[in-house]
Image: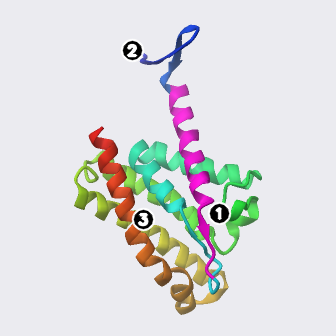
Amino acid sequence: MKTKTILFDDTGILSIDDKTANIFTILIGSLLIGILAQVSIPIPFSPVPITGQTIGVVLVGALLGSKKGALSVLCYLIEGAMGLPVFAQMKAGAHVLVGPTAGYLWGFVIAAFLIGYLAENGLTSKPLNSFLSCFAATTLILIFGTMYLAAFKLGFNDALFMGFYPFLVGDVVKSAVCATLITSIRKI
């Protein structure tokens, strides 16, 4: 039995199947990440800015689930690679996906899948569990980004000082914000 999502408009009832609704949801998720990417603060000693992307990735993953969340991030990466200015500081192009911040960008896919998986298994329903789940996802992004930075030209110690340590406090704050939003949205 095929289910349908029904939307009402001024002309009557518009029927959209689940596949179309899923595609729309995935695209909206990628748009959210792209918008939050523009909340960006450059760090003078690092090629990696502080951005709102992480919040977008965690929210999209937790709210859409593991598969749709990861697909939403992949759409975001494809949009940026195709030239849409969705990356931090309005950057675009495939070269960004291999530049100094590439490890963070590719880590977004895995982090969205992880937080989605944790949400699907009930680990984001309570505030503390939600915070820990969000922190695990954001830390995973930092680990991927730092490993790529180390391989990119910096070496491991420099990568830690430029791409990991400066972002830990921010990730605690972002995780708290995401956990609050996720648990609040789930209650509604």
* Residue drawn at the location 47% of the way across and 74% of the way down: 143
Residue type at mark 2 is: Met
Observer-side mark, 2 or 1, equals: 1
Alpha-carbon distance for marks 3 and 2? 41 Å
Q: Which of the image's four quarters has the C terminus? A: top left
Q: Main secondary structure of the magenta part?
A: helix
Q: Relative to 101, is 3 above or below?
A: above
The residue that mark 3 highlights is 174
Mark 3, other Cα within 10 Å: few <14 / some 14–19 / many ≥20: many
SS for dot 1:
helix
The residue that mark 1 highlights is 88
Q: Is residue 48 left or right of residue 107?
A: right
Please report whichever mark, 1 or 3, sits nearer to the chain's N-terminal start: 1
Residue type at mark 1 is: Ala
Residue type at mark 3 is: Lys
Numbered label tally: 3
Alpha-carbon distance for marks 2 and 1? 43 Å
**Residue 120 in which image quadrant:** top left
The residue that mark 2 highlights is 1
